[in-house]
Every structure is written in structure tokens, then in C-alpha cells.
Image (tube, coloured by chain):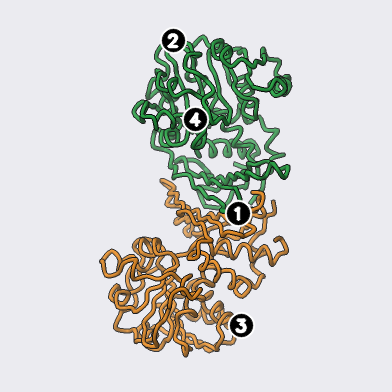
Chain colours: A orange, B green
Amino acid sequence: MIVIDREKLAPLPLLTLAAPAIRDAYIAMTDGRANLPPVGYLALAGRNADCHVKYGYIEGDPIFVVKIASGFYDNPAKGLPSSNGMMVAISAETGDVTAVLDDKGLLTDLRTGIGCAIATMALWRSDARSIGIVGTGTQARIQIRALSALSDRPLEFMVWGRSPEKTAAVLADVADLGLSIEATTDLAGLCRHSDAIVTTTPSKEPLIRSEWIAPGTHITAMGADAPGKQELEVALVARADRLVVDLAGQCLDHGEFSAAAQARLIDEERCVALGAVLSGATEGRRSNRDITIADLTGIATQDIAIARTALEALGLL
Amino acid sequence: MIVIDREKLAPLPLLTLAAPAIRDAYIAMTDGRANLPPVGYLALAGRNADCHVKYGYIEGDPIFVVKIASGFYDNPAKGLPSSNGMMVAISAETGDVTAVLDDKGLLTDLRTGIGCAIATMALWRSDARSIGIVGTGTQARIQIRALSALSDRPLEFMVWGRSPEKTAAVLADVADLGLSIEATTDLAGLCRHSDAIVTTTPSKEPLIRSEWIAPGTHITAMGADAPGKQELEVALVARADRLVVDLAGQCLDHGEFSAAAQARLIDEERCVALGAVLSGATEGRRSNRDITIADLTGIATQDIAIARTALEALGLL
């Protein structure tokens, strides 16, 4: 059993290397190759902490993956990050543990960022150039890097945050990319200006109003991943021409689309799977005036895809 | 993150060291301290293989545990063991991975053996001396070692197997204990002679007939752990005065008691929890003429208990 730590994974160019496998990970969800049991959930009584266990198998893959991701919400007060994670990659030939990826959540951050970039690029208008990034955390940075690395065209970024210091820090952190990028505290202005918007906040109240969104805009909503989180007005979700999900059961239960579903404004029939859009089985955007929204909550096939890519890059598969 | 391999775990005297914690692991199931989500199950399409993920938390414990156990049923043809397993022990204070226990199933074998010995000793007659072991595999050996190590009295063992060579091998493997022990191919004779019987086979047909079992006998049935496995006649299960389970949902679904439950000869109300017997909340054996049967299918609190004990013994907790 080999242990691979975060320091060994961080230098790998996974944003580009893993994109084809993560694209395929969505398609595997829709063509019968993926076996994805329900996500396991453990609450730690008395600890203000919990743990998710995500696992699955893509038929034909050399490995399968069990990911253990914990949230310890009192950690920041101790100077520790609240989230942690590791993956166990197991040979699908023999059951031997191929490697323990002690990535402390890095691979999850990257596969999430890559997946959202893939969704954004699959659903934006063919002439989209201006990208609005809502939020100033880790995923704001990863979205800028992933879209820049994977896009077939030059992009212009605008980053919104309530704090000018935090948006300035995002710009400083991606300065090495030499991008056209600016910061704003005017969210309505960002929405009106952007061809595609990526929302990356942990907001529990809708930030983006329907009236700010022009026809033809695409939105990838990645922040809402638990009950009670919401970044978009339900009227905007209800109004969209195309609703795209990674996994309808998750998105309608605890993703961005859950509030609109609870209000009975949308249902599963309104949603199409990202994998079906990527494979061509279903249309994504159908006109330049469509408003499209992708709600991504994360699926274990993405974990398999990035773990496999990392192990291949390290010569271990 | 520390990795502890099987070779480092094997010399630890866990059969005795872990017994108090495993006893408490059953009690924790009945007094509200244990959080035990449903066992995760992943089938690997096209591989004749599967994987179980067991995890849980005992309130107040310094760690929680995620166990990954795989079964690769084509492995024996390749000269590899079909079952494999490892445990991840995670700090319940911070979410940091305390250790990866790369035990390849050793800790599962030991916690299973200890748990069954605890159940046997809790339910046998106060004058029980003669122990019948049914089967010649790993658990036959572990049962003999665990009962010898944990019993408050000298015991006499009889081991049954269809193959005299295999029973002789069991006796040779425990010769270091200097026990009173004999082998037999007469299962009816073993049953009639034994005060307590432990069944450890993967049989898919009932081996033990009701007519062979005298009043006052205790049976611990540990072999049946999946649909279709059965070691005892359903008439024997139906006739027993006391049915004891580690977890009723598991035992009635895919343990020894499932066949009798499917035949509607018993139901959950007939079963009492081993933890409640151990804590004194419920009576176990109620007379010297009771036939008692314990059906044990394995629970994640046992994994937590043995992982914690091993880490303590290694000075890591």
C-alpha cells in the first residue's frame, strides 16, 4: 500500500490532465457504466462534526475509490481547516489497496472545479467571453484557473465579493495567469455584464435576483451542497430554459435546485443530466436566448476520475 | 498519517486487550451512544467482486472508524485470498486521519472472534465446560483461542469438520495452548456432548438439526453473514427459548435468523440485543434448561473498539 500525500499531488497539472476523465465520469452516470451507491453520512454526536463517505465504480476501470470527507466545524477556532478528506484507491482486479491518497481535500477541490468548468463550457453561448465569478474562496480561484486552462477561447473575468480585500486577494492569487480580470462589489452589475456566471459561495440566502439575468446567460451554481444553502432566487431557477444536474436526486434534495423543488416550481422532469448533454444524448442550450443553469453537487465518479488520473500521472497505474 | 500494517498488528495480544472495549461496543448499541449508519455496499459489475463499507461512532470516543472490506471471489484461482480489508481511524477531535490500519482483515477476524466468545460466555449455563466448534477455518481457530483466553474456567473442546485432515490441522494449530481438545466427524455426537456450540462455517444448508440439541445448550451462530447462508435448522431457531442478536435488522435480513424470519417462525420481537444482555438491561439465559442462540453478523462498533485498542497498545492514542 502506497501513501501519496498532498505535497506530492499538488504539483501535478491535474486541471488539464483530469478533464477528459471527469467529462467521462459524468457520461458514465448516464450510460449504465457507473455504480454509485447512496452517499454515506455519519454525524458525530457532541462534536459539531460529520463525515461523508462517497464511493463507486465505473465499469472497466482499473480501480474503484472510497472517499472519506469530514467536516469539523469547530476546527477554525483551533486554527485548523474545517474540511478534510482522503481517498482510498482499490484495485478492481484484486481488491488490494492500490494507494491511499492523503490529499486533505485537494483532489475534491480540483475535481469539483474541473467539473464545474466542463459544465460551464458545455452550456454557455457559443460567443461567450465574459465570466462572472461570485465568491472569493478556494473555488473562485480554482474556477478561474480551470476555465482559463480548459477554454478554447480567451476569457474576461469579473470577481464579486462583499469584501474588496478578499476580491483583491483572489486577483493577486491568479496574477500569474496574466488574465483580463477585474474585481467588483456590484453583484447586479456583474450579472448584467457576464455571459456565464459561476456561483461559489456558501450563502444561505439567495444572492442573485432573476431580474439581473439577461436572456442567453449561463449560470453554474456550485455553492449549495447542503440543505438550507441557496445562491439563486427560486424565480430565476423556475424561469430558466434549461436546468442541468449532475445527479437529480442530490440536486433536488440538497443542491441549488432544492428550494425551487420544495416550492414545487420545478421537478425532476425539468432537469437533464450533465452526462447526457456531454454525450450528445440530450440537448443542452437550445438557443442564444436560453437561460441555462447547472446545479452541481458532486458525484463519486469524479473522485474515481481524478484519483485514476493522479495515479497514472505518478506512474502507479 | 501513520500506516500500520498487518505484521505490526499481529503480535499484539488483542484477544484479551480488546475484549472490554468490544463488550462495551455491544452495550453502546443499546444505550444510545452508538451512531451506526447503514452498511454501504458496492458491487463491481463484471468483476465477481464487491465491497462493504462499515463506519460509525461511539459518543465520547477519541476516534471514529471507516472500514473498507472487499470480496474478490475470483482471487483464489489467482492464488490470492478472496477477502481483504483495511480500516481508517480518524480523530473525533479534529477529523485528521489518525492512522490507516492496513490489516488485510486481521482486525475483523479478531473482533469477530472476540465478540462471539463474549456472547457465548454471556449465554452458556453457569456450569458449561464442553465447547463444540463446528468448522475448521480461521474462525474455528480464533474461537478456541478467544474462549480459552477469556473464559473464567477450564474448557474442553471438540472440533467438527467433514475432513479429518482439516480438523487435525486445527488441533495442530492450537497445540501451543495445551488444551483438552479432540476432533470428530460426528456432528450429532458433538451437538449432544457440548454445553455450548459455536458454528463457524459458510454453509448454505442447515447443518445442525433441532433433535440433536438438548435443553440447556447454548449456540453462537457466526457463519451466516449473507443471504442464502444457514447453519441451523429453522425448527431449532423457532424452538429456542432465547434468541440474541448483535443487530436485529442485520440478523433477520441476512444472518442465521433470516431463514426462520422468512418462514415467519420468528420476528424481531422474539430477539433481544446482546448489548442489553451484557449491560443487564435484559435477561439472557433464564434457566438451566433454556436453549439460547446468539446470531452475530458483525457491527462497526466492534471495528471501532478493536482499532482503538490496537492504537492504544501501539502508543498512538
Q: Is residue A210 left or right of residue A56?
A: left
The residue carrying mark 3 is A176
Kind of residue at badge 3:
Asp
**Mark 1 Cα shell of 10 Å, populated few (<14), some (14-19), many (≥20):** many
Decide: few, some or many residues near mark 4? Use Cα within 10 Å; few <14, some 14-19, many ≥20. many
Q: CA distance from mark 3 to mark 2?
A: 81 Å
Look at mark 4 in the image and give the residue it sits on.
B296
What is the CA distance from the residue labelled 3 to the residue labelled 4? 60 Å
Q: Which residue occupies the foreground of this view, A118 or B72? A: B72
Q: Amino acid at mark 2?
A: Asn
Nearer to me, A260 or B192: B192
Question: Do circles 2 and 1 both sit on a common chain?
Answer: no
Mark 1–mark 3 distance (CA, rounded to whole Å): 33 Å
Q: Is residue A15 above or below residue B282?
A: below
Camera-side mark, 3 or 2: 2
Q: Which mark is residue A88?
A: 1
Using the rendered image, report if marks 4 and 2 lie on a common chain. Answer: yes
In the shown orientation, is residue B111 left or right of residue A167? right
Q: Where A217 falls versus A14 (above or below)?
A: below
Name the subunit of mark 4.
Answer: B
Q: Chain of mark 2?
A: B
Determine contact: label 4, label 2, CB under 8 Å: no
Residue A83: x %, y % from top left: 50, 59
Q: Which residue is mark 2?
A: B288
Please report the residue visible at 59 percent of the width from the left and 45 percent of the height from the top: B70
